[in-house]
């Protein structure tokens, strides 16, 4: 069985593909520390950002099967029009295991909670 969830957001400003919004989290070259797993040695994770590209997306679509979760990210080209039809250009597809998707859910939940504490509840 396949589950689908669509979410479209926009802030009324013209979308761009230049830089991602600032993230007030950990330094860019080091991931946050997590408790080590049993038998694992604690240490730092170094992230190689030399090939990292940032793209603005205002549309996300998610589907899942038993073995994977697929996230599609794109750009709503008709953000300033009042049409019933919407033209979305997909730019990225991320495929995760359900376990990785669950970790992502936890990270995003924590991030949104922190955002709402700083800037107010998202409606």
Image: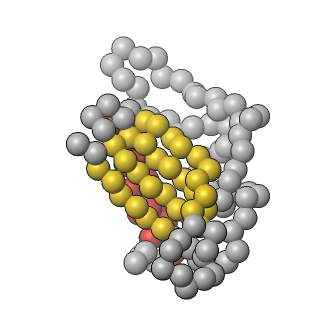
Please identify the quarter of the rendering in which residue 36 is found: top left
Q: Is residue 16 above or below residue 61?
A: below
Task: Residue 57: tell me if it is visible.
Answer: no
Which residue sits at x=68%, y=53%? 55
Q: Is residue 56 above or below residue 77?
A: above
Side of 81 where 52 appears, left or right: right
Q: In this view, does 50 lie above or below 80?
A: above
Task: Residue 72: tell me if it is visible.
Answer: yes
Side of 67 where 51 appears, left or right: right
Q: In this view, does 14 lie above or below 101?
A: below
Q: Which residue is situated farthest in the bottom direction here? A: 82
Side of 32 where 34 appears, left or right: left
Front-most of 119 and 69?
69
Residue 2 drawn at (x, y percent): 28, 45
Which residue sits at x=50%, y=49%? 72
Which residue sits at x=73%, y=58%? 17
Say which quadrant the N terminus sits in. Answer: top left
């Amino acid at each position: 069985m396949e589950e689908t969830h669509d979410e479209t957001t926009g802030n009324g400003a013209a979308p761009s593909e230049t830089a991602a919004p600032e993230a007030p989290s950990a330094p860019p070259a080091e991931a946050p520390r997590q408790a080590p797993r049993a038998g694992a040695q604690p240490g730092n994770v170094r992230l190689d950002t030399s090939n990292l590209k940032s793209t603005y997306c205002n549309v996300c679509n998610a589907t899942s099967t038993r073995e994977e979760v697929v996230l599609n990210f794109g750009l709503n080209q008709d953000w300033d029009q009042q049409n019933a039809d919407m033209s979305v250009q997909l730019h990225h597809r991320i495929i995760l295991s359900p376990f990785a998707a669950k970790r992502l859910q936890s990270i995003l939940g924590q991030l949104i909670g922190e955002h709402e504490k700083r800037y107010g509840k998202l409606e």
